[in-house]
Amino acid sequence: MLEDILLDDLAQRKLSVFNHLLTTSEGTYSIHYFEQFTDFSYARLNSLFSELNDDLLELQGIELLNEQGKVAIDPAKLRNVPYLQFLFRKSLPYKFLLATILERNYRIDKFCKDHFISRASIIRRLQPLINYLKDFDIQLNCSKLQLSGKENLIRIAYLNIFWLASYGEDLFLALGETKRGVDLFDSEYHPWMTYIEPREWYLLKTISRLRIKKKHYIIEPPFEQLVFPKVNDSFIKELEQSKLTQCHIDREAEFLSFMMFYWSIYIYADDPRLTYVENYMESEQQPLGDLMKHFENFYSPLFAEKALTLDEKKVLNINLFTTCLNHFVTEDSLPLAINFMDTLIKEQKPLYEHLSSKVGAFFNELTLHAEFSWIKNCLDDLVRICSFLLLPFYERSNRKYQLNVGIILSSNAIFLQSLFNFLEQISFISVSFVTSTSDENCDFYIASSKLLIPEKSLKKKNFQIIPLSPTLDYQINLLDILHSWYTKKSSSFRI
């Protein structure tokens, strides 16, 4: 997780306390109250809440502590606080990484002086970042504030961290960029912005500009005859004016096109970029052979109960194809943004372990064929990413492993339908309308009154009461409760 790379112990402790506040009911509490939920002493908690209060005042003018020194909690307000990003942007490793791309002729001694920290301390703080970058053969020269390695991977690592930490805002501010959104681009780009966040794409172009200024160029592209339209005219003109060689201009332009069309995870079947990737996937030029045919034969039986629609299959196959394509080139780990969410996804998705074991067996069998022997070198990464891509459909198709939720009927049909629609979108839930006397045995019940809850469920406490006129944020609390019950049920899965 990015927290482990950028945040020191104090910041992680503050984040832990802040996350607990998000699950605490609105009200005023003494600091002693929180001792029961943490391993921190009263003195440590008192200090943490004081620092949290200062942070929230600086960030959004929110006073966490009242005049009596008690903790005043309004979860609705706190949910709107980007506290994690605030901590990222305050962290020294993040500021150090910013300096490596923004500053020229900048050395570690100057950085230490500017941030009132010793050389030994900053190197110690940088160790998690150094280790992370080493996974992709990227070396961080602390003394000279320089990154070296494969230039495409360096830029992608920058992109992931700067985007997750500040959505590129710190680079934009440092360079005096005032525009935000689609107006960052000429009209030639607009057709491709349907499902691309313009700020993220502009961030990548900004990283490329800054690296080129420092004479770090993209190496020869590893792919042949990739299919994509010409979309980088304005950037090419910039490079021509900088008197870059035509070879370097072509490589830089192709890198940006590759990132736009072959790096992203696709979500929608009507994404205008899909046509180009699909054409390449079905062409004889792509180097993966019949991999997608093998993949379809593998995953189709897993979704037998609820088969994929044509659009779902199209998007899934392209995502699986580009994932394998990218790993085929490096035959190694890649700096993917999803890697920072790895632990969280595994914790929240109990079916992941069962699915990943099946995906692992599939890939291991493939490696017995000479044309797929390259998979051995990046097996763990492929299993993880492909399992994440397959997981929503796997959860949806395995209804017997879902949490069966019964909504007990009442007179407010409009609210009930709204609740039903909300729950139906959650992959680990199977939802239906029931009555208080129904024979259907649900894992969990939702009703507008305790009077409607079956007697056996009152004893099991597997229910939630939601008034007919609920507050707007009832869904957040309900989702947490349902996931907790799903985790309990899934702990006994045998697949």
Image (tube, rainbow, N blue to C red):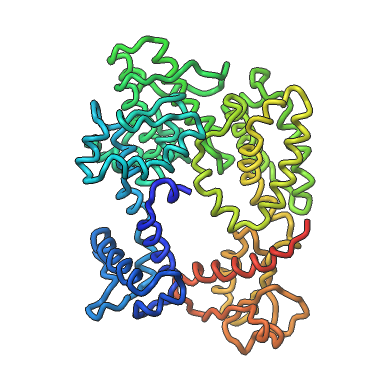
63 vs 467: above or below: above
Give the quarter of the image for residue 428.
bottom right
239 vs 445: above or below: above
Residue at 31% across / 22% down in the picture? Answer: 214
Residue at 50% across / 70% down in the picture? Answer: 477
347 vs 148: above or below: below
Q: Nearer the viewer, residue 192 or 87?
A: 87
> Does residue 194 appear anywhere in the picture?
no
Image spot of residue 414 (x, y percent):
55, 73
Q: Nearer the viewer, residue 347 or 264?
A: 347
Residue at 29% across / 71% down in the picture? Answer: 64
Quadrant of the frame with the C terminus: bottom right
Image spot of residue 174 (x, y percent):
24, 38
Image spot of residue 454 (x, y percent):
69, 85
Left or right of residue 394, residue 474 in this image: left
Left or right of residue 348, residue 178 in this image: left
> Does residue 331 appear anywhere in the picture?
yes
Residue at 65% across / 58% down in the picture? Answer: 350
Image spot of residue 134 (x, y percent):
48, 33
Give the quarter of the image for residue 151.
top left
374 vs 365: above or below: above
Left or right of residue 466, residue 197 in this image: left
Q: How many numbered discs?
A: 0
